[in-house]
Amino acid sequence: MERPYLATHLAVVLGLLGPLADEGDASAAALHSLLSAADPDPRTLVEAREVAWEQLHTGRWSAVSDVFREAYGVAQCLRAAQMLQSGDRCDPAQALEDIDLALIMGGPQTHRVAHRLVEEANDARRRGGPAPASRSRKRRRPSGGNEGRRPQLSPPDPRGLPWRPIKRVHLPSLASFQAHCLDAQQPAIITGAMDHWPATAAWSTPYLRGLLGPRTVPVEVGATYIDDDWSTELMTFDAFADRFLDDDSHADDDDDDDDDGDDARTSRAAETSRGGARAAQPVITRPIGYLAQHELFRQAPELRRDLRVPDYCALLRPDEDGADAEVRGVSCWTPCRKGHKSCAVVSPCAPRT
């Protein structure tokens, strides 16, 4: 094994599995035996991964021992390392898939090792390794004269609800924010505080494709988790962008008249006019997919470098679960978030009006 850091991590994992195996845990004993081989072959690593995978999917996720998460992570990392040093058969995209599964499912000690392997895999890609698999389906523009248009959403009807406008302030001083917002417990929308972020200028679908294209991410598919067809899928970011994001860089693809499946579909929605008549208006509906309940910045730290922690977060107190202000200041990426948080940050891609 040419990577001392990976050998060290493997020794740590074997040290964690040993006591469990001595206590009679059959899965821990099997993993210890499989991972103890001087140079595990690919079939052995697949078997080790499957044993750990079974433990990860037994009972509640919160009750899964970190030992089995670490075992799964190191098996995935070993598979990726073997792929990266396989000469002409090196497939950086396959290695990245194994590494990402280690980051998503593996234990916390796996992350440091996995990120070093990510760097190696990206270097292999830049040296001319095989390109990721081509997209399996192309989107066609929906018919009906509304090519490429998003559905127009109306704000909720405030009638009968107690509400009042939230004041907007442009770059208040820290002292003013403390006195008039925090101490007074008055909500406010701060404008201009993210204009200097690199993300506001750089983040676009093509940019994210460049950083994350072959990376595997968990995607929740469906409008809400209570829908019958709601599901969670693992897919590359390229596949996620193809299915769910508008991407001007692939406009030519939209003009192709191939017979592949079309994720977009046209429906008719009735809209009430001022006079009370109901006129049918075409509305474009698409499947909804989103990255949620996943720490993307931990998986891809390079995205985190495009952000800046707002100075106002320095005035916030840790919340009840112990999260510090810096983490909370950059952890909310939906345009509107419900909850009892002192600070919420909108997506850099959301309108900043």
Image: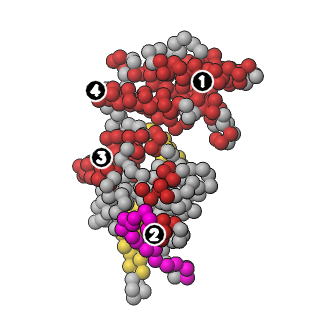
Q: Secondary structure at mark 1?
A: helix
Identify the image quadrant of residue 333: bottom left
Quarter location, residue 13 = top right
Q: Residue placed at 55% from the left, 80% from the top?
A: 162
Residue holding disc 1: 13
Measure the alpha-carbon separation of dots 3 and 2: 33 Å
Does 175 appear above or below 75?
Answer: below
Q: Position of residue 277 (x, y in %)?
A: 41, 85
**Residue farthest along the top direction in this orientation:** 38
Mark 3 or 2: the one toward you: 2
Question: Relative to the observer, which residue lies in front, 147 or 169?
Answer: 169
Of labels 1 and 4, the one closer to you: 1
Packing grade of label 3 (10 A; few <14, some 14-19, many >=20) is some
Residue 247 against residue 149 in the figure, above or below: above
Q: Earlier in the sequence, mark 1 or mark 2?
A: 1
Which is more N-terminal, label 4 or label 1? 1
**Secondary-structure class at tag 2:** strand
Q: Are marks 1 and 4 in contact (CB under 8 Å)?
A: no
Q: Earlier in the sequence, mark 3 or mark 1?
A: 1
Crowd rating for badge 1 (residues with CA inside 10 Å; few <14, some 14–19, many 20+): many
Q: Position of residue 287 (x, y in %)?
A: 44, 55
Circles 3 and 1: CB atoms closer than 8 Å = no
Amino acid beneath label 3? Pro
Q: CA distance from mark 3 to mark 4?
A: 20 Å
Residue wearing tag 4:
128
Task: Please name the residue that numbered disc 2 is placed on.
Answer: 188
Q: Amino acid at mark 4?
A: Gly
Above or below, comparing residue 21 to residue 198 in the picture: above
Identify the mark nearer the N-term, 4 or 2.
Answer: 4
Where is residue 283? Give x, y as percent. Answer: 38, 67
Magenta segment boundaries in residue numbering: 160-177
